[in-house]
């Protein structure tokens, strides 16, 4: 069959995938700590049908050759770790990471996961957990009688317990960073998991070793730029359309051929 | 049978295959740093006595467009757009090949890659130490701020080369290589812009027009098929009657 059909198919498929990523980005425009995905394409391998410089006869060589491409390919999606806009919420349990780093949480199965969404809460045992209920690592327990919880820039969590005049230190929050955060596996629920591509996590106190500081009473918004996504969407839609036009042109050609031989 | 039908065949064949080139260009309309393939039909005389008027059409398609693609801002420190006709060098088999795709990614070992291929620096693939901030200067110098340090430190420099489109061709992986197969030397005059990415240089309008015109061209070839057929048929009838 006409190879142009298959090539256009790769184009249509690629734009389909891109639209899916755009839709997901736009759906998460208000998700705290969300990092947008970028779809990366690559041209597929080429069929080299005739090498330039091939011998035509004893004396002459062909000045040009024939190389036919095979379409486009989705290489991967890349999480873009630019900082989202900071929103001041005034809630004492909200923390934003200003700079690099992730908070560590423990999943139900005991695995470690990482997040930048800092809407912290206290569960029934008094442990600090994320909005989804996963406990933070290192473990910090807030006593039931605590008032005025403070989370310092360096991660020190303290609270004033009823009856005491001095605040009590409850624990130290640590952050981790990766050499290639874009290689982290997005699990959903604002969580990321370590992969071989991301490298091993390096742990440290906030504000040290290049890790960001914690800001209490603020949240990091999504880093999705609505206008950019819209422009991307228009481009994806039109590219899709143009690829289907080639598809129908290729189909037409096959039709002319079929009619000619009838 | 009259050889007309073979001449038509070469034209129709060229139409089908040229369509493949344009389909590939359009499929890569959103591929970062993609260079459009150019397709050209040449005529080839049929050798032999009595064939003076017979010219077959032949497709040649191994040139690429040197036009610059649209550049857009991404704000990502590791995205680079290359000005003019410069290119990045990446590792390919034993040697190197070139690309204008500038979405650089650091892998788990700290190696700088683009589409999974190591990016070449002054002396081989570039490897970055653990860093908190990275910046790529206009001349391709990569500096990083290592954890616990205040100043940016120079690590390596992107190998940037320059060559004109007519001297370049694509290899089977879609990477650009020199037509003569030689390695290109680093060129100091090539500049890059960090935080920007270049899109594909495919012109959608041109490709669409080419697709439509090939479509009609093919239709005409098919009409000629029919005429050749009816001419042969008329000849056959002459004998029968």
Image (cartoon, rainbow, N blue to C red):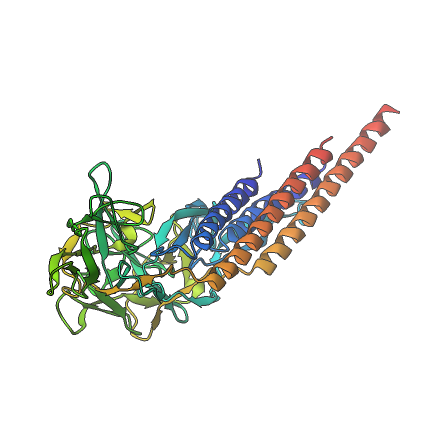
The answer to whether residue B122 is above or below residue A65 is below
Q: How many marks?
A: 0
Closer to the camera in the image, A9 or B65: A9
For the C terminus of chain B, the quadrant is top right
Q: Residue furthest front?
A: A163
Residue A37, relative to residue B147: is it above or below?
above
User: Can residue B7 be seen?
Assistant: yes
Where is residue A190 drawn, in percent x and y? Answer: 33, 50
| Image-quadrant location for residue B8 | top right
B235 on left or right of B64: right
- Going 58% across and 56% down the picture, which residue do you hit? B207
The part of the image, by quadrant, that contains residue A31 is bottom left
Tell me where residue A191 appears, x and y as whole percent.
30, 48
Extreme residue in the top direction: B240
Residue A249's x, y, as percent?
Answer: 64, 45
Which quarter of the figure is the N terminus of chain B placed in? top right
Horizontally, is B23 left or right of B239 in the view?
A: left
Left or right of B228, for residue A126: left
Q: In this view, does A6 lie above or below B52?
A: above
Residue drawn where x is 20% and y is 38% of the image? A110
Q: Nearer the viewer, residue B225 or B122?
A: B122
Residue at (51, 59) in percent of width and height: A230
> Picture coordinates of residue B189 (x, y %)?
32, 75
| Closest to the observer, B193 or A168 | A168
Q: Give above or below for B196 relative to A114.
A: below
- The answer, for residue B53, to whether it is visible in the render is no
């Amino acid at each position: 069959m006409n190879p142009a059909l298959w090539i256009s198919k790769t184009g249509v498929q690629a734009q389909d995938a891109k639209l899916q990523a755009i839709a997901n980005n736009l759906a998460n425009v208000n998700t705290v700590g969300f990092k947008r995905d970028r779809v990366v394409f690559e041209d597929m391998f080429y069929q080299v049908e005739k090498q330039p410089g091939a011998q035509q006869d004893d004396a002459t060589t062909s000045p040009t050759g024939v190389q036919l491409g095979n379409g486009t390919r989705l290489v991967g999606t890349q999480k873009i770790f630019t900082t989202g806009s900071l929103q001041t919420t005034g809630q004492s349990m909200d923390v934003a990471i200003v700079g690099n780093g992730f908070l560590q949480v423990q999943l139900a199965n005991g695995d470690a996961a990482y997040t930048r969404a800092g809407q912290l809460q206290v569960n029934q045992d008094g442990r600090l957990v994320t909005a989804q209920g996963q406990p933070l690592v290192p473990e910090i327990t807030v006593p039931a009688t605590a008032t005025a919880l403070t989370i310092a820039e360096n991660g020190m969590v303290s609270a004033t317990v009823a009856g005491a005049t001095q605040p009590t230190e409850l624990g130290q929050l640590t952050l981790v960073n990766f050499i290639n955060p874009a290689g982290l596996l997005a699990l959903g629920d604002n969580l990321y998991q370590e992969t071989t591509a991301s490298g091993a996590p390096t742990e440290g106190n906030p504000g040290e070793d290049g890790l960001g500081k914690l800001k209490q009473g603020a949240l990091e918004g999504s880093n999705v730029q609505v206008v950019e996504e819209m422009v991307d969407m228009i481009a994806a839609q039109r590219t899709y359309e143009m690829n289907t036009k080639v598809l129908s042109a290729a189909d037409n050609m096959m039709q002319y051929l079929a009619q000619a031989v009838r | 049978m009259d050889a007309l039908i073979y001449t038509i065949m070469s034209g129709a064949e060229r139409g089908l295959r040229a369509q493949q080139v344009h389909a590939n260009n359009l499929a890569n309309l959103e591929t970062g740093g993609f260079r459009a393939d150019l397709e050209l039909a040449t005529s080839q005389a049929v050798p032999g006595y009595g064939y003076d008027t017979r010219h077959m059409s032949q497709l040649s398609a191994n040139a690429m467009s040197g036009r610059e693609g649209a550049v857009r801002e991404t704000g990502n420190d590791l995205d680079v757009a290359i000005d003019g006709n410069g290119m990045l060098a990446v590792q390919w088999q034993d040697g190197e090949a070139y690309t204008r795709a500038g979405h650089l990614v650091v892998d788990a070992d700290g190696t700088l890659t683009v589409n999974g291929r190591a990016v070449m620096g002054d002396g081989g693939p570039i490897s970055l130490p653990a860093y908190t901030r990275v910046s790529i200067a206009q001349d391709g110098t990569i500096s990083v701020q290592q954890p616990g340090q205040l100043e940016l430190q120079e690590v390596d420099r992107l190998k940037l080369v320059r060559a004109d489109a007519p001297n370049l061709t694509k290899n089977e992986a879609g990477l650009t290589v020199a037509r003569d197969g030689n390695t290109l030397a680093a060129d100091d005059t090539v500049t890059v812009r960090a935080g920007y990415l270049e899109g594909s240089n495919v012109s959608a309008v041109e490709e669409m027009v080419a697709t439509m015109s090939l479509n009609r061209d093919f239709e005409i070839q098919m009409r000629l098929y029919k005429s050749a057929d009816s001419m042969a048929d008329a000849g056959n009838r002459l004998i029968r009657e």
